[in-house]
């Protein structure tokens, strides 16, 4: 069944599949996106494991990570995810001004040099290939080592994909 331009997929409320039971059991809160992903139990378990590792097992500064995620989501219409990350980002000390201006980093004064580099990196990451060369270098190498740059790129890969996922798949608001 299709609603508008988005494809509808059923929400899994309960399951007897061990991967779904285990994954639902370790999530602090089960959101509708989790209920949709649970339609593929094994992939759901591995996908949420990957997302958990990106959030909790990286060297990336959590506030920088949230700024970069919000930038990619803003550039690609990931409103479902952005709603949660705007709130979550404030737990890492980000101001509302910082959270709401992630695609205007060169126009506002609320970011330090490292944060601007992270946001430029996110903008280049999210850009169409033909646009990347027109964007300024991020300068991320000045602040982040190889591991951190890789971890940030993998994090943005996930959230760029999620923005496209929720742009095509109908995920009801929680």
Image (cartoon, rainbow, N blue to C red):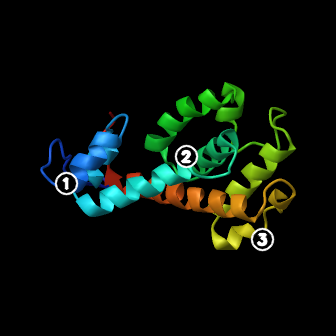
Quadrant that contains the N terminus: bottom left
Q: Nearer the viewer, mark 2 or mark 3?
A: 2
Which residue, given by chain and number where applicable, does mark 2 sit on? 56
Direction from residue 11 to residue 160 in the image, left or right: right
- Residue reaching furthest to the bottom: 130
- Residue reaching furthest to the left: 16
Query: What's the distance in space between the residues labelled 2 and 1, CA to CA?
Result: 24 Å
Q: Position of residue 8 (x, y in %)?
A: 23, 53
Quadrant that contains the C terminus: top left
Tag 2 near tag 1, CB within 8 Å = no
Q: Earlier in the sequence, mark 1 or mark 3?
A: 1
Q: Look at 60% across and 48% down and name the residue there.
A: 69
Q: Position of residue 74 (x, y in %)?
A: 58, 46
- How crowded pointer 3 is (Cα within 10 Å; few <14, some 14-19, many 20+) is rated as few
Query: What's the distance in space between the residues labelled 2 and 3, CA to CA?
Result: 32 Å
Q: Earlier in the sequence, mark 2 or mark 3?
A: 2
Direction from residue 53 to residue 15 in the image, left or right: left
Question: 13 or 58, which is in the foreground?
Answer: 58
Query: What's the distance in space between the residues labelled 1 and 3, CA to CA?
Result: 47 Å
Q: Earlier in the sequence, mark 2 or mark 1?
A: 1
Mark 1 element type: helix
Q: Is residue 2 above or below residue 104?
A: below
Q: Position of residue 98 (x, y in %)?
A: 71, 33
Which residue, given by chain and number where applicable, does mark 1 sit on? 18
Res. 167 in view: no
Tag 1 near tag 3, CB within 8 Å = no
Which residue, given by chain and number where applicable, does mark 3 sit on? 133
């Amino acid at each position: 069944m299709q609603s508008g331009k988005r494809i509808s997929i059923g929400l899994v409320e309960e399951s007897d599949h061990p991967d779904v039971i285990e994954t639902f059991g370790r999530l602090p809160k089960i959101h509708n996106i989790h209920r949709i992903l649970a339609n593929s139990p094994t992939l759901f378990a591995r996908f949420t494991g990957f997302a958990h590792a990106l959030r909790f097992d990286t060297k990336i500064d959590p506030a920088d990570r949230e700024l970069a995620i919000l930038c990619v989501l803003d550039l690609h219409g990931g409103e479902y995810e952005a709603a949660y990350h705007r709130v979550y980002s404030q737990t890492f000390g980000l101001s509302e001004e910082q959270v709401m201006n992630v695609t205007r980093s060169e126009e506002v004064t609320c970011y330090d040099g490292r944060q601007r580099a992270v946001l430029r990196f996110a903008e280049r990451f999210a850009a169409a290939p033909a646009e990347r060369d027109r964007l300024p270098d991020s300068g991320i190498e000045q602040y982040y080592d190889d591991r951190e740059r890789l971890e940030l790129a993998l994090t943005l890969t996930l959230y760029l994909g999620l923005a496209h996922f929720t742009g095509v798949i109908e995920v009801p608001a929680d």
